[in-house]
Amino acid sequence: MVNLTKLFLGLSAVAGALANPVGEAHNTTELSRRAGTPSSTGTHDGYYYSWWTDGGSDVTYTNLAGGSYSVVWSSGGNFVGGKGWNPGSAQNIAYSGTYSPNGNSYLAVYGWTRSPLIEYYVVENFGTYNPSSGGSLKGTVATDGDTYDIYTSQRVNQPSIDGTATFTQYWSVRRNKRTGGTVTMKNHFDKWASYGMPLGAHNYQIVATEGYYSSGSSQITVGQASGGDTGGGSSTTTTSSTSTPSGGSGGSCSAMWGQCGGQGWSGATCCSEGTCNYLNDWYSQCS
């Protein structure tokens, strides 16, 4: 199987350091006009972004205003990039835009967790290669108006956010492609857990455009959505805790799998579902 796993080796250690301020006054950052936009991570206009390329593609990545970005690519090579949040969470993600691949490419919610080290995809659209063609089928989840097929695969001694490592990939692949809508991440996370696919402490989470020896273009806008789908009208159901949230100083509590504490954390310290569990000095999570 052609696997599009990204080699974000070392980028997390320099998050924010490589953000290019040029063009900020116009709410647009052009990272490069060379054959390949150099790899970088950081924040731009209120959103986290992550961009990685192996240098083999003629590809230009551009941070646009707010949660928007664009990618134009051609020829060989491997890349992935987009905007979102760091850390990620079981939030409702709204996205829209255009996506026109020619060949092997994905449009997906993409992220990582630690302890366990997991690379995950919720694939909304793809080019000529369906990622469900490989891996081990675990089941399905019905959410956001469609059915997603759930798979796992393993990467052995491959680069990751923690350097070279062996880790598992989680996949939810939408059967009917789309380029816009709401992705209810909690439904995927809960269903993964029911199939023995736990997540760890969240690292970044982006709506990513990815390409592998292909060509195309995309322009995507990312944001948070209120509400969310509780199962797409079929077999998947979700339940809510009736316990009273604890902790915090008022305001909204974190959702299940969301951050609720840690050194430097200024957000909610209570959980709307579950309890706030300490994972390390920098991260506590609702679970």
Image (cartoon, rainbow, N blue to C red):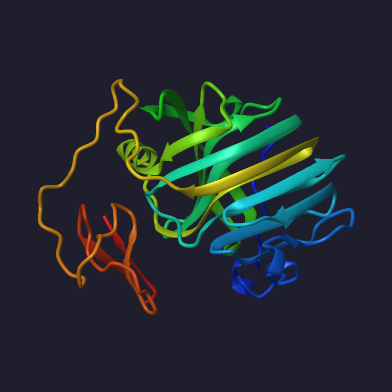
| The C terminus - image quarter | bottom left
The residue that appears at 20% across and 68% down in the rendered structure is: 250
Q: Is residue 140 left or right of residue 65?
A: left
Which sits in the foreground, 201 or 40? 40
Percent coordinates x, y for residue 85 in the rendering:
50, 58
Vertical placement of residue 187 versus 162, above or below: above
Percent position (x, y) of residue 178? Answer: 56, 28
Q: Residue furthest front?
A: 26
**What residue appears at the point 34 percent right and 57 percent down from the top-left corner?**
258
Q: In the drawing, does residue 69 fall left or right of residue 86?
A: right
Q: Is residue 244 visible?
A: yes
Residue 86 shown left or right of residue 39 in the figure: left
Q: Quadrant of the N terminus?
A: top right
The answer to whether residue 160 shows anywhere in this view is no
Query: Residue at the spot x=84%, y=55% of the render?
Result: 36
Decide which of 23, 179 is in the foreground and name it: 23
Quarter-of-image position of residue 99? top right
Count the labels in the image.
0
**Residue 176 % position (x, y):** 53, 21
Residue 63 spot, x, y in % from top left: 68, 57
Residue appearing at x 50%, y 37% in the figure: 171
